[in-house]
Image: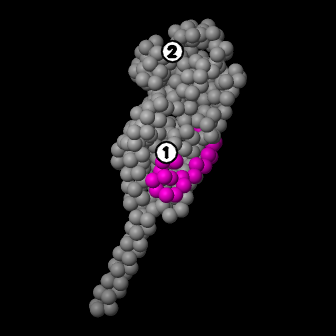
């Protein structure tokens, strides 16, 4: 009996020691560079936000947050690489609307996003902007709708990839406005916008951060924003809902880590990200990009992930969009 009690004591002591070591490692975090996976090509909203927030985190935590662009499969390649990574806090994911959308859009995913990631922090919610090239004659949204109805399938609608919010914002618009356009998916918003500028495609529902510089320069023209109300960054640009009642779509961004990442690390990252978002200079930059910071604990971001997943599921089912095999 004495030997048994001694064995139990030694095992318990060993477990406590391991837990103590793990807690100490979390307190020291990070001690080496953090790999931040972005599931799309450089130049789009995902990349812009990751580099902005990553630079601030690098300054605060003393280790570089290295952006790794892993485009493909509407963001699924990047998401799966993080989900399967070691849950040690040194691999994180830039969360974007495709992660919520793909849960319902793809038939054979090897993961369920809300279940298989550890939410870290939300960043920002922004509108997409319905934007056309300079060669498009329609100057207003009603004029564009009339043109698209008169010329079904002749407008090429670019997107950052099948299943992205830039795609489904357009699909929702086609259903609600009763128009038909040809979807042209790209491997990220950057290449899509490049072809917009070159005139190969006529329209994109791109997110505010990546498209607004081209709108402000006059290279492209904004017809409408996808939020229910107008954006303060483009006050003269109407909301789609003004011509298509009930239309609304917006993009939520944040950070997630592999499931089972230590809570101490999740909480540390959350505190630092919230401090970055509360910084006046960062807030100013985020507002310039078209949205307001969304500050909160990991649990709040987890609730938003679940809510967004359900929202886009309803859009996919309501629009009758076929699942991607």
Q: Residue at x 29, y 92 (%)?
A: 2
The residue shown at (38%, 55%) is: 267
The residue at 55%/39% (across/down) is 48
Residue topped by disc 1: 53
Residue 159 sits in which quadrant? Answer: top right
211 left or right of 300? right
Give the labeled residue for mark 2.
177
Q: What whole-number distance in Å separates the C-alpha atoms at marks 1 and 2?
A: 37 Å
| Visible residue check, residue 171 | no
Q: Residue at x 43, y 65 (%)?
A: 28
Q: SS of the residue at dot 1?
A: helix
Coordinates of residue 206 in the picture (x, y in percent): 56, 28
SS at mark 2 in the image: helix
Q: Nearer the viewer, residue 267 or 246?
A: 267
Asked where in the image residue 25 lies, by quadrant, the reply is bottom left
Query: In terms of depth relative to the viewer, which is nearer, 203 or 77?
Result: 203
Q: Nearer the viewer, residue 60 or 42?
A: 60
Q: Position of residue 185 (x, y in %)?
A: 64, 31
- Is residue 189 shown above or below 77? above
Percent of width and height locating residue 57: 47, 51
Task: Give the x, y percent position of residue 255.
Answer: 47, 47
**Looking at the image, is 289 positioned above or below residue 226?**
below
Residue 129 counted in the magenta span: no
Magenta span: 54-75
Residue 59 falls within the magenta-colored stretch: yes
Image quarter hosting the N terminus: bottom left
């Amino acid at each position: 009996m004495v030997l048994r009690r001694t064995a139990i004591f030694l095992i318990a002591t060993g477990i406590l020691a391991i837990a103590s070591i793990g807690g100490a490692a979390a307190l020291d975090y990070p001690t080496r560079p953090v790999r931040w996976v972005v599931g799309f090509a450089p130049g789009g909203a995902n990349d812009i936000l990751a580099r902005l927030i990553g630079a601030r985190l690098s300054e605060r935590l003393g280790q570089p947050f290295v952006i790794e662009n892993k485009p493909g499969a509407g963001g699924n390649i990047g998401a799966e690489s993080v989900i399967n990574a070691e849950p040690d806090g040194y691999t994180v994911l830039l969360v974007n609307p495709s992660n919520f959308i793909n849960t319902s859009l793809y038939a054979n995913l090897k993961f369920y996003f809300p279940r298989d990631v550890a939410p870290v922090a939300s960043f920002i919610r922004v509108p997409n902007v319905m934007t056309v090239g300079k060669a498009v004659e329609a100057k207003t949204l009603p004029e564009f709708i009339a043109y698209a109805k008169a010329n079904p399938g002749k407008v090429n609608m670019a997107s950052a990839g099948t299943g992205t919010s830039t795609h489904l914002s357009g699909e929702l618009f086609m259903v609600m406005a009763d128009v038909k356009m040809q979807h042209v998916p790209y491997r990220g918003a950057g290449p899509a916008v490049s072809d917009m500028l070159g005139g190969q495609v006529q329209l994109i529902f791109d997110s505010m951060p990546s498209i607004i510089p081209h709108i402000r320069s006059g290279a492209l023209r904004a017809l409408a924003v996808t939020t229910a109300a107008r954006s303060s960054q483009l006050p003269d640009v109407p909301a789609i809902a003004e011509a298509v009642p009930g239309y609304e779509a917006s993009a939520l961004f944040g950070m997630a880590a592999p499931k089972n990442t230590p809570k101490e690390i999740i909480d540390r990252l959350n505190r630092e990200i919230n401090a970055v978002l509360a910084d006046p200079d960062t807030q100013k930059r985020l507002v310039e990009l078209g949205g307001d910071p969304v500050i909160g604990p990991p649990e709040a971001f987890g609730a938003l992930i679940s809510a967004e997943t359900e929202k886009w599921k309803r859009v996919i089912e309501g629009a009758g969009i076929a699942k991607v095999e």
